[in-house]
């Protein structure tokens, strides 16, 4: 049954999500992407759905698809909550909201980055005149995403990156590659040079649905780091902050800050967490990401590298392009009943704690 919550592609996921929202009386607003299409030149959308008592002052917001194929996980959870009746039960007392396919382009094409090769979770800078510098990425840029993607050159690039890790430690390599960079538009983990369409659209949705809200918990669904099927609760606030205290009150010591060495993630620049927390600062939001492990970190990186190269230099419809796309999907969505069940059980557990905290 749980396998039915998960979909084979973006279009099936969206159709199931919208159908379940309609069946359960959720109010839907959809924004068609004005500058990008999915496979077969099909339109793609970011969708927002909400339900709850008119006078409810507390909201749980769940976001899917920030990183393209990670949307299979998030959309599966959203659809499962709708189909199982859990969302309707929660919506008797509180506002329950879903934002589906934050990165619709990446979800549709099975690539982590958006239509402009931007990592949306690096695109929420407060000051675009002074983007963070990442000299370590600058040093590794030719190996982070080689323009020649022959097998020989890709193996050479991986060898160079492993050498860097052996010399400086894996956390240093992870930070150099994934923390976010703003100098190489054709590189990996590029944060952009200004707010993307997805950035503006999700902020508009978040602002509109929270006008009468006083307390909000936001869960952003992610995959790719950590042990298989394990869901780590991540935040990008430091442990000595008021924001972290709000999270700790809900999930206790399960909350891991990316500003500590305990996290499976590097400390990131320009996160959705920081963007929505600032936008909704009057509500003192509690924002977390759940990160579900899939395969080993180097294979995840290689799949990310492959679809970034494909977007910038390759042909998505070629046999080689389809192979790289499949590798990306497999890296972020294992398509395993065991994994699906772990994701579902853990996601419900984490979200239920937010609901319990409201009470």
Image (cartoon, rainbow, N blue to C red):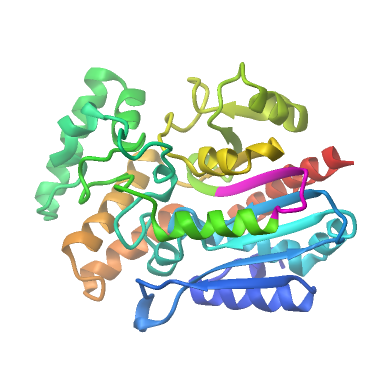
Residue found at x 57% / y 33%: 235
Quadrant holding the C terminus: top right
In the displayed structure image, the side of residue 89 where residue 341 appears, left or right: left
Q: In this rendering, is residue 306 above or below 234?
A: below
Q: In this rendering, is residue 99 above or below 302?
A: below
Residue found at x 46% / y 65%: 104
Residue found at x 68% / y 48%: 347
User: Quick one: 128 or 71, which is closer to the camera?
Assistant: 128
One can see residue 318 in this view: yes
The picture places residue 169, in percent across and down from the top left corner, at 31, 20
In the displayed structure image, the side of residue 255 where residue 106 appears, left or right: left
The picture places residue 298, in percent across and down from the top left corner, at 33, 40
Residue found at x 76% / y 49%: 213
Is residue 216 found inside the magenta-colored segment of the image? Answer: yes
In the displayed structure image, the side of residue 189 where residue 242 appears, left or right: right
Magenta residue span: 210-221
Q: In this rendering, is residue 246 above or below 285?
A: above
- The quarter holding residue 83 reads bottom right
The picture places residue 176, in percent across and down from the top left corner, at 29, 30
């Amino acid at each position: 049954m749980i396998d039915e919550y998960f979909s084979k592609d973006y279009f099936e996921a969206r159709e199931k999500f919208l159908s379940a929202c309609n069946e359960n009386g959720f109010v839907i607003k959809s924004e068609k992407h004005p500058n990008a299409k999915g496979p077969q030149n099909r339109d793609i959308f970011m969708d927002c759905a909400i339900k709850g008592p008119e006078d409810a002052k507390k909201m749980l917001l769940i976001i899917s698809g920030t990183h393209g194929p990670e949307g299979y996980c998030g959309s599966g959870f959203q659809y499962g909550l709708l189909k199982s009746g859990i969302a309707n039960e929660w919506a008797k007392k509180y506002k329950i909201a879903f934002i589906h396919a934050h990165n619709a382009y990446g979800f549709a094409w099975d690539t982590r980055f958006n239509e402009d090769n931007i990592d949306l979770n690096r695109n929420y800078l407060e000051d675009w005149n002074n983007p963070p510098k990442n000299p370590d990425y600058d040093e590794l840029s030719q190996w982070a995403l080689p323009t020649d993607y022959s097998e020989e050159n890709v193996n050479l690039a991986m060898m160079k990156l492993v050498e860097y890790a052996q010399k400086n430690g894996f956390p240093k390599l992870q930070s150099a590659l994934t923390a976010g960079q703003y100098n190489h538009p054709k590189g990996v983990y590029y944060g952009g040079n200004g707010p993307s369409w997805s950035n503006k659209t999700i902020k508009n949705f978040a602002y509109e649905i929270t006008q009468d809200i006083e307390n909000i918990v936001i869960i952003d669904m992610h995959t790719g780091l950590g042990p298989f099927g394990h869901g780590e609760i991540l935040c990008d606030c430091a442990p000595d902050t008021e924001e972290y205290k709000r999270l700790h009150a809900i999930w206790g010591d399960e909350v891991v800050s990316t500003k500590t060495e305990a996290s499976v993630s590097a400390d990131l620049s320009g996160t959705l967490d920081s963007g929505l927390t600032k936008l909704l600062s009057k509500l003192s939001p509690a924002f977390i990401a759940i990160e579900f492990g899939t395969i080993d970190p180097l294979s995840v990186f290689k799949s990310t590298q492959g679809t970034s190269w494909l977007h910038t230099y390759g042909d998505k419809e070629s046999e080689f392009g389809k192979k790289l796309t499949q590798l990306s999907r497999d890296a972020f969505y294992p398509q395993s009943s065991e994994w699906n069940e772990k994701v579902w059980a853990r996601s419900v557990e984490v979200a239920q704690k937010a609901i319990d905290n409201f009470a």
